[in-house]
Amino acid sequence: MRCIADSAPGPSAAPVPLEGPDPAVVLRRFRPTDVPFVAAIVADALHEHYDPGLYLSLSADWPEGFLIAADPHDVPVAFLLGVSQVPREARILMFAVDRNWRTRGVGRRLMTTFLDRCRERGYQRVTLEVRVSNATAIRFYTRFDYSVVDLLRGYYSDGENGYQMARPLP
Ligand SMILES: CC(C)(COP(=O)(O)OP(=O)(O)OC[C@H]1O[C@@H](n2cnc3c(N)ncnc32)[C@H](O)[C@@H]1OP(=O)(O)O)[C@@H](O)C(=O)NCCC(=O)NCCS
């Protein structure tokens, strides 16, 4: 799984309006019906194609770690999928905003909320992987206090190197 982060909708799956520059977008938990929309964003933004069941299984362990940003029609326009595979650490497996919704603060809101979820769980560190060529994402992560901790040679399926980035959670 490269750079890439169900439960049945419960009370906490209700959309939560967020303050920010684009109030039309709300953040909520992932639902199984989001899979086709998430898969389309992944295909376009991350150039990856995963079995739909993967999203369901990844969300099972930590449903609050799979955040969806939805438009006024409740259609996902961005998402952040986080998991925890190491004690007291979270890892961002996938993070992408639909190209038509970028630079409107949606990514910032997803990351801010995700870091809050991590703090609620007592996590002390967050890690992720990113292509060395993905300057936009690296700049974005750097603004959120992530720094490069490792070079991952040939990490991506096309042979490109990756960076592992990490940030502490105070
Ligand atoms: C990286 C990504 C998630 C950022 O999401 P976004 O919604 O466009 O970002 P935001 O609008 O919230 O911007 C947050 C900050 O980053 C800056 N930023 C975002 N995109 C930028 C760009 N293309 N150029 C310059 N700055 C940019 C914004 O100016 C903003 O800065 P500020 O907080 O100081 O105002 C988005 O570009 C994306 O989905 N890229 C393709 C998928 C990808 O690369 N995912 C990461 C894989 S590891």
Image (tube, rainbow, N blue to C red):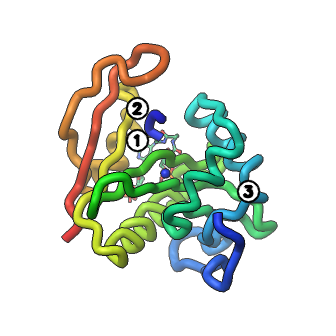
Residue 137: which numbered mark, if any? 1
Nearer to the camera, 53 or 142: 53
Which residue of the protein is positioned furthest toward the right in this rendering?
Answer: 73
Query: Would you name the residue on which mark 2 appears?
Result: 134
Mark positioned earlier in the residue sequence (2 or 3): 3
Q: In this view, does 2 lie above or below 37?
A: above
| Above/below status of 20 relative to 162 | below
**Residue type, mark 3 in image:** Asp
As displayed, is residue 130 above or below residue 154? below
Mark 3 or mark 1, which is nearer the start of the sequence?
Answer: 3
Number of other residues with Cα within 10 Å of mark 2, as a class: few under 14, some 14 to 19, many 20 or more: few
Label pair 2/1, CB-CB below 8 angstroms: yes
* Image spot of residue 95 (x, y percent): 50, 48
Mark 2 to mark 1 CA distance (whole Å): 6 Å
Q: Is residue 24 left or right of residue 104?
A: right
Badge 3 crowding class, 10 Å Cα cut-off, few under 14, some 14 to 19, many 20 or more, is: some
Q: Which amino acid does label 2 sit on?
A: Asn
Q: Is mark 2 within 8 Å of ligand 1?
A: yes
Q: Residue 167: x and y, percent?
A: 23, 55
Q: Say few, some or many: other residues with alpha carbon within 10 Å of mark 1 (under 14 / 14 to 19 / 20 or more).
A: some
- Residue at 72% of width from left, 51% of height from top? 35
Does mark 1 have its CB less than 8 Å from ligand 1? yes
Mark 1 vs mark 3, CA separation in Å: 24 Å
Q: Is mark 2 on a helix, strand or loop?
A: loop
Residue at (45% x, 34% y) in the render: 2
Number of the label disc, if any, that sits on residue 34 = 3
Where residue 10 sits, quadrant-wise, is bottom right
Q: Position of residue 156 (x, y in %)?
A: 43, 23
Q: Quadrant of residue 42?
A: top right
Q: Nearer the viewer, mark 2 or mark 3?
A: 3
